Amino acid sequence: SRYYPQPVRRVAIPKPDGSERELGIPTVTDRLIQQALLQVLQPLIDPTFSEHSYGFRPGRRAHDAVLAAQSFALV
């Protein structure tokens, strides 16, 4: 059998300037499948990333990237 993701639910969130930001919310089943894939693939793929990569990495924050950049600037 094959898996086909369901259409996302669109929700408009008001912004302070009066405009709206549109969000797409996946179904519970699709979120479950996304999380299962993440848990299987992340340990395999994460070690191949650069040690200088901080975006969307477990255990790394934007603050860590700033500290690393500052340490390079001081060298």
Image: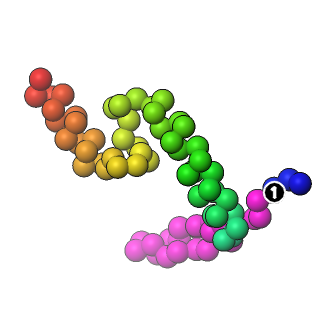
Left or right side of 15 for 7: right
Residue 52 vs 17, above or below: the answer is above
Front-most of 59 and 66? Answer: 59
Residue furthest to the right: 1
Q: Is residue 34 above or below residue 8?
A: above
Residue 10 at least partly seen? no
Frontmost residue, 37 versus 69? 37
Quadrant holding the C terminus: top left
Q: Residue at x 22, y 36 (%)?
A: 68
Q: Position of residue 4 (x, y in %)?
A: 81, 57
Identity of the residue drawn at 48% across and 29% down: 48
The residue lying toward the viewer, choosing from 57 and 40, is 40
Q: Residue at x 45, y 33 (%)?
A: 47
Q: Position of residue 35 (x, y in %)?
A: 59, 58
Q: Residues within 10 Å of mark 1 (few under 14, many from 20)?
A: few
Whether residue 1 is situated above or below residue 41 in the rendered picture: below
Q: Is residue 40 magenta?
A: no
Give the residues drawn in magenta, as a range: 4-26
Amino acid type of disc 1? Tyr
Q: Does residue 14 show up magenta in the picture?
A: yes
Secondary structure of the residue carrying numbered label 1: loop
Coordinates of residue 65 in the picture (x, y in percent) = 27, 41
Residue occupied by mark 1: 4
Residue 2 seen in the figure: yes
Residue at 66 percent across and 71 percent down: it is: 28
Among the 4 quarters of the image, the one containing residue 3: bottom right
Q: Position of residue 11 (x, y in %)?
A: 61, 74
